[in-house]
Amino acid sequence: MTYSVLVEVQLRPGIADPQGATIERALPALGFDGVNGVRVGKSMRFTVDAADEAAARAQVDELCARFLTNPVIEDANVTIEAP
Amino acid sequence: MTATVGVVQFPGTNCEHDVVEAVGAVGGSATLLWHGDGSIGDVDAVVVPGGFAHGDYLRPGAIARFSPIMAAVADFAERGGPVVGICNGFQVLTEAGLLPGALQKNAGLKFICDESQLRVASNDSVLTGGTEVGDLLSVPINHFEGNFTCDAETEQRLVDNDQIVLTYVNNPNGSVADIAGICNEGRNVVGLMPHPERAVSALLGSEDGLVLLGSMIDAAAGARV
């Protein structure tokens, strides 16, 4: 089976996010009030061939831990969709 | 008998020739090591120089750590061999797990190319053996992702083990504890964001990098592994 995968990488809570902070500071000047907690991350989409969804998830989790994130500063949120 | 320094070259590395030149200035000899080779040959020390290894894609150092030569570098470090990562090389060594912590975007979100004043925080490392604690060194920085970060537990361990070797006098990038350079627990692996190889001649504005690279050569000659 081929599964669609979305990996969202974000800085871990407590890790300073200068990009998010800069965006947040710019918002009031543009007339957007009350927007808080801006965090900037990145997303990656790909497909994985695996026997079942659990196998796909195990493979993606390992891929995230070893390569797609730096666990010192980043977390990943993984979404897997069956075809 | 002088020491031979292997200088790792990834696609996108751009400071390797500066390091080769600077190693010559402190009496060592240098040889380039290609990232795709599985061996570092018969060198006495390894420098992972600055640049943009593999384009810095994904994260600085994230792809470089999987280059075949890095297994040999890790093995050399494990045996006590001196390994120094400069700028992008520091990022590569943290990604490879040879040094703790990580380097993220500068606090001000600006690429900084400037002189920096460094203070020697520990002279018990392969890069600072010839210095005294408290020495002030003028060494340039040139980076966007030089903001050293780690969790509080790791920071405490760095302090307790005297692993912080260089700090900024005026922290330019937001680094935790003003950290400019750290070493591993074995004290033979050092990473720093400033470029000592660009401070080896009065013509370049500073000669303060000489004592650092000279210390590395002394450590390499004294601790052949």
Image (cartoon, coloured by chain):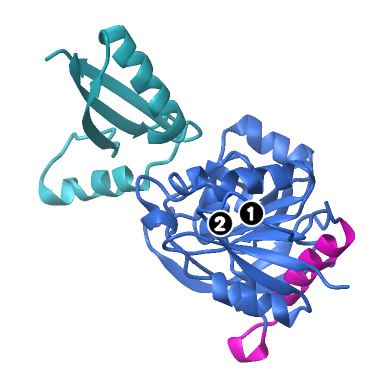
Q: Would you place residue A77 above or below residue B99 in this image?
A: above
Which is nearer the eye, B159 or B35?
B35
Chain B on-screen colour: blue
Q: Would you place residue B93 above or below residue B127 in this image?
A: above
Residue B129 percent coordinates (x, y): 84, 61
Q: Are marks 1 and 2 on the same chain?
A: yes
Q: Is residue B92 visible?
A: yes
| Residue A58 on the magenta span | no
Chain bearing mark 1? B
- On screen, residue B86 versus residue A50, left or right, reads right
Residue marked by disc 2: B89
Residue marked by disc 1: B191
Residue B59 percent coordinates (x, y): 40, 46
Check disc 1: other Cα within 10 Å, few if <14, some if 14-19, many if 20+.
many
> What amino acid does circle 1 point to?
Gly
From mark 1 to mark 2, how far is it between C-alphas?
7 Å
Q: Quadrant of residue B110?
A: bottom left
Give the main secondary structure, helix, strand or loop, of the magenta stretch.
Answer: helix
Q: Which residues are magenta?
A: B201-223
Q: Secondary structure at mark 2?
A: helix
Q: Which chain is cyan?
A: A
Residue B176 percent coordinates (x, y): 58, 46
- On screen, residue B196 versus residue B120, left or right, reads left
Q: Secondary structure at mark 1?
A: strand
Chain bearing mark 2? B
Check disc 2: other Cα within 10 Å, few if <14, some if 14-19, many if 20+.
many
